[in-house]
Amino acid sequence: MKKYIVMLTIAAAMTACSDFTEIIPKGKVIPTTTEDYREMTIDVANSSTGFPIANVSCDDVFSTDQNGVSATSKAYFWLEDFYKVNENDDAWNKTYAHIYVMNVVIGNVMASTEGTTSEKQAILTEAKVWRAYYYWYLQSLYAKDYNEATAATDLSVPLSLTPDLEAKLPRATVREVTDQIWADLDEAEKILPDQATNAFRPTKGAVYALKARILFYEHKYNEAAEQARLALSVNNSLYDMRTWTFKKSSKPSAGINGREIHNYKSPEKLWYMSNSFSSLITSFCISDDLKELYDEGDLRFKFYFSNLTRTGGPWEDGRYRYLQNLDYSFSVPEMMLIEAEALARNNDSKALDIINKLRIKRIDTEHYKPLTANKETSLLDIVLKERRRELCLNSLRWLDMKRLAAEGIYKTVLKREFNGVTYKLEPNSKLYVLPIPLQVLSLNKNIIPNNRK
């Protein structure tokens, strides 16, 4: 790996320092060439871009690690704080580390050497898309559900736009963070190509997809659908799971014939998001609630979950684990489901056409039947169930619970028990907003903690 990666990517070393992100660069080598800055953005893109804390809290999982001590266990039981003052919250710390790197790129790449103006502009623009994504991700976890009426006063996260390690920034408002996200994306949309040879690099299709997701979680469904359609105009490819087979039926984890070994090569990806948390599957199983959503013949259940270990033996508890690495990518199915939900909310039966277009590639030939509307099940309910089946364990379910609870649609009271104590997550609970890490609060007194009581 080139020398400048040591330098800033740095910046990703977490330690107890005086700034709000707790980031200190390691090394003194400074990037100078345009290629240096390109490698910096690629290195960040290849690192974790999503963290499992939101998966742990949602209703898709059942934990076998119920110790009440680890951060993931605390998140599973929705405790007031997940991390001790001497522990790092990766979702906060590493995301801000990535933002720091992107701010370095944004502030310096145009003055770099050995590159053309167009090459520098491309790197600058990609860095802004990454920064926009990271701020959306942070805001989604650490701020309230988006409300247009209160966005100007609701607290979001500190908004850092320069690589200043000493700044002790307060929390910006949801409106301020959202405005910055849109400023970065609107600029990028004008410059980026529709597609790129590297799935990690943001493109115009990625910008459309990110805009669609942002609008979707702002409850602006028709506008979200417009952006989703633009994303699908760039790529609308779907895997046909009916062609898949296990490489070794007695050991499902050995792989799948007909599927790319590396997720970033998937034809369904609009923008690939990597991660390094595949070990989560060993301590968290899918919930009975999620398992029951999959009908007979649903190939997603067959290929995504297994009650066998990686050696082929059965898990002692008999429960099903997730076979895949956790994937936080922007995909064609997500865009289809955004468009379908917007149509369903308008009582437009075209929503079913989209759902059936997806399902015909997900259900084996013997069991596939097109879904039809009926008096017992609303269009919206059909779409929401399909969304949960297709997009499980990518952190979106937690955000969907939060979004739908705010609309009065998700009314479930989740209950989890540990050592004789029952923990509850009520609809619209303050627990849907994750805690600002105690370590961050101890180092920056300008940050107001989230009230989770």
Image (cartoon, rainbow, N blue to C red):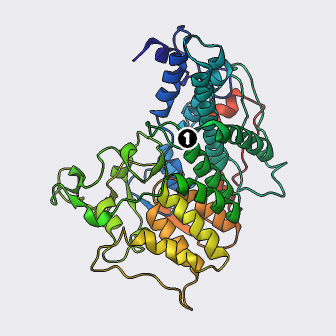
Residue 201 in picture, x, y percent from top left: 50, 36
Using residue 401 as the reference point, say whether residue 272 is left or right of it. left
Closest to the observer, 39 or 145:
39
Residue 264 appears in the figure: yes
Using residue 384 as the reference point, say whether residue 433 is left or right of it. right
Residue 422 appears in the figure: no
Please tell me in which quadrant of the rendered image residue 384 appears.
Answer: bottom right
For the C terminus, the quadrant is bottom right
Closest to the observer, 434 or 330:
330
Q: Judge the density around disc 1: few (<14), some (14-19), many (≥20) Cα neighbours within 10 Å.
A: many
For the N terminus, the quadrant is top left
The residue lying furthest to the top in this view is 28
Q: In the figure, 426 relative to 134: above or below? A: below
The residue shown at (57%, 37%) is 84
Using residue 312 as the reference point, say whether residue 53 is left or right of it. right
Q: In the figure, 450 relative to 28: above or below? A: below
The residue shown at (70%, 37%) is 187
Q: Secondary structure at mark 1?
A: loop
Q: Amino acid at mark 1?
A: Thr
Closest to the observer, 135 or 108:
108
The residue to which callout 1 is attached is: 203
Residue 381 in picture, x, y percent from top left: 56, 77
Closest to the observer, 300 or 35:
35
Residue 420 in picture, x, y percent from top left: 48, 63
